[in-house]
Image (cartoon, rainbow, N blue to C red):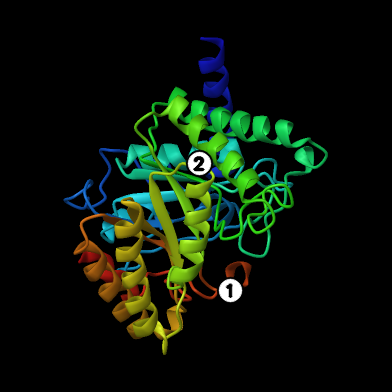
């Protein structure tokens, strides 16, 4: 009981910090005025909106096509999405994307009855193909201690979600881990066995809290089949465990057709080769090319839905606009309204 009341206190305290700039009647709930999509199960159509609380704190606002100010996740649902993805950092200097911030955002998604994907980076900052940096507090750990830290961190965050009766449908153990994670100990091209052990610590921790959650191993560049075969063969040969293969895809306006053809071939190969489900965890294209972005997304969603074991498509930070963090692959225009590109999620 002490633990639950502690989280209650933390949650109430942080709502004022992480969820500013919206009146009470705009904060989403399951009985709000948003227009719900009909299918909240089956094929996942979603967005990673992990920046949302930081954007709100900075005064950024979001508007629907009529110009009405709308809470970000409620707007995503109105646009046809049924799922939200949220990244987790261990101890970020700014506080954004830490456990408490994730809890606030996951509660919003849960109140909207949207499905939730949790994305563990196992870092204090971005984890991606070029950066898989250990958290500052983990830097001097032995490998055994590092494994224990992965277990403890995963368990702690997921247990906090469980306390608030938030059940993620999917959990990523690592982000874009095409060459492993927690370098150098878990660098896959140097020690695949170590990476498999760290991965399994995350996998087992997820299952200990949410036995029915599907654990994702997520790689970058979903159009590159050889990279996926190398990594997943390596995991398999070293006892690595996963339920779902995750992919990213970021084409340009003149390359999306080739990228889509290649990722669909890769999706089918992963399903056949490993008998596992696949989800496209991240996609994005410059909003300036909104016609091309719509065609890219519409084609990708339609072709993915036709594959029985392809579970869904998630846009990465579509609500980013007006130069936010210098990111140019959002799907909102400079006035804070969604562009044509997001119409693809109505399919």
Q: Residue furthest right?
A: 140
The quadrant holding residue 273 is bottom left
Give the residue at x 58% y 36%.
99
Q: Residue furthest left?
A: 38
Give the residue at x 46% y 63%.
229
> In the rendered view of the protein, which quadrant contains the C terminus?
bottom left
Give the residue at x 42% y 56%.
246
Q: Callout 2 environment at 10 Å: few (<14), some (14 to 19), or many (20+)?
A: few
**Mark with earlier residue (1, 2):** 2
Do the residues under discs 1 and 2 have CB atoms within 8 angstroms? no
The quadrant holding residue 65 is bottom left
**How many callouts does the rendering have?**
2
Q: Can you identify the residue that label 2 sits on?
A: 239
Q: Secondary structure at mark 1?
A: loop
Q: Can you identify the residue that label 1 sits on?
A: 323
Residue 67 shown left or right of residue 39 in the figure: right
Where does the image place residue 115, in percent across and percent down from the top left?
Answer: 33, 44
Residue 287 shown left or right of residue 88 in the figure: left
Image height of 159 relative to 248, above or below: above
Residue 297, can we see it? Answer: yes
């Amino acid at each position: 009981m002490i633990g639950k009341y502690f989280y209650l206190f933390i949650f109430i305290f942080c709502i004022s910090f992480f969820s500013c700039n919206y009146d009470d009647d705009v904060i989403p709930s399951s009985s709000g005025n948003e227009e719900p999509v009909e299918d909240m199960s089956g094929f996942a159509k979603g967005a990673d909106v992990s920046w949302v609380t930081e954007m709100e704190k900075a005064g950024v606002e979001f508007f629907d096509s009529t110009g009405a100010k709308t809470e970000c996740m409620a707007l995503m649902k109105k646009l046809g999405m049924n799922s939200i993805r949220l990244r987790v950092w261990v101890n970020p200097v700014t506080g954004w994307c830490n456990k408490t911030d994730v809890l606030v955002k996951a509660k919003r998604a849960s109140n909207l009855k949207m499905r939730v994907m949790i994305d563990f980076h196992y870092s204090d900052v971005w984890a991606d193909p070029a950066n898989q940096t250990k958290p500052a507090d983990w830097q001097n750990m032995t490998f055994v201690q590092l494994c224990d830290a992965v277990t403890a961190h995963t368990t702690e965050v997921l247990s906090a979600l469980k306390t608030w009766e938030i059940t993620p449908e999917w959990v990523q153990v690592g982000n874009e881990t095409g060459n492993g994670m927690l370098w150098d100990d878990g660098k896959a091209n140097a020690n695949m066995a170590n990476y498999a052990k760290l991965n399994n610590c995350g996998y087992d921790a997820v299952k200990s809290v949410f036995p029915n959650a599907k654990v994702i191993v997520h790689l970058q560049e979903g159009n590159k089949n050889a990279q996926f075969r190398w990594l997943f063969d390596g995991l398999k040969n070293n006892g690595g465990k996963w339920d779902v293969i995750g992919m990213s895809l970021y084409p340009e306006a003149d390359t999306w057709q080739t990228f889509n053809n290649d990722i669909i071939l890769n999706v089918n190969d992963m399903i056949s080769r490993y008998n596992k489900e696949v989800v496209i965890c991240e996609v994005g294209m410059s909003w300036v090319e909104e016609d091309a972005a719509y065609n890219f997304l519409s084609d990708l969603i339609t072709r993915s839905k036709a594959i029985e074991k392809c579970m869904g498509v998630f846009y990465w930070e579509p609500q980013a606009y007006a130069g936010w963090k210098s990111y140019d692959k959002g799907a909102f225009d400079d006035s804070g309204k969604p562009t044509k590109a997001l119409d693809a999620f109505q399919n």
